[in-house]
Image (cartoon, rainbow, N blue to C red):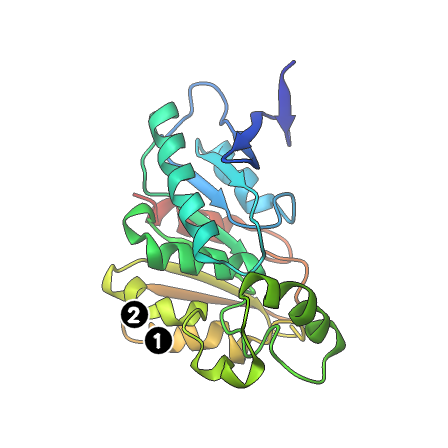
Amino acid sequence: MSETWNGFACERFEFEGQPAVVVFPPAGTSVKKLVLKTEYWNAFPDVERRLVERGFHLAYVANRTRFATREDCDTKARFVRFLAEKYGLSERCIPVGMSCGGAHAVRFAGFWPELVSCLFLDAPVLNYCSFPGKLGVAEDEYVWDHEFVLAYPGIRRHRLLGFSEHPLNMADVLIAHRIPVLLVYGTEDRCVNYEENGRLLELAYEGTGLLKAVPVPLRGHHPHGMIGDNGELVRFLAEHSD
């Protein structure tokens, strides 16, 4: 029985024991390029849907944790290569990282820059001191106790400043490989503070001409994407895919 995602044909399967899905562009439109959603598969999919309309394949493989362990990043690398071989796609994909998916996208690109053409980050978690390491915020402390310490056994808050696994630590690798970044954020985001996360990546990229930051006035952490037309975002990603 055929399956669909937002009106497009798709295939659901398991990859290395994790649920996975690949969405196919309309017949005769394929540009042989891949968009990789890194977390929250069905959340705010308008940008991905529009890229599929333009001929991109779209795929996702479930993570073991939201916090971008090396294991999950390496699984994504094997997944991208598997899809490239099976469907004749370029190995250089566009990771789409929303919130904690931003941590996955940036760390994946840092470990496997040869597999990335450009990055789309929306309200990304890039600094674990900010989320979920911040004290005094009940939701953050719950996530720390019930998710983060399971992803990184043995981590303690007093060691977090020197923690080597912060996604931001990949900035120099991304810049060295000249990976373009589209960075979207809500000016009223109280969940993943932009000044403590995306802004730091923006500063790292300063002077390179490789990062486009797009503030969305009056938007909080949700909804992701622009409030209205996402055409500007889709055009940037299509133009910077290779």
Q: Quadrant of residue 130?
A: bottom right
When the figure is inspected, residue 190 is found, relative to residue 14, above or below; the finding is below
The answer to whether residue 219 is seen in the rendering is no
- Which residue occupies 64% across, 32% down? 6
- Which residue occupies 62% across, 16% down? 2
Number of residues whose C-alpha sits closer than 10 Å to that of mark 1, classed few (under 14), some (14–19) or many (20 or more): some
Quadrant placement of the N terminus: top right
Q: Is residue 161 left or right of residue 220?
A: left
Which label is found at residue 172?
2
Judging from the image, what secondary structure is the residue with disc 1 in?
helix
Q: Nearer the viewer, residue 228 or 5?
A: 5
Asked whether disc 1 touches disc 2, contact meaning CB atoms under 8 Å apart, the reply is yes
Q: Nearer the viewer, mark 1 or mark 2?
A: 2
Spatial separation of the CA atoms under disc 1 and disc 2? 8 Å
Which label is found at residue 204?
1
In the current view of this chain or complex, which residue is farthest to the top? 1
Q: Identify the amino acid type marked 1.
A: Ala
Residue 49 image position (x, y, % from top left) = 56, 38
Q: Identify the amino acid type marked 2.
A: Asp
- Which residue occupies 48% across, 39% down? 51
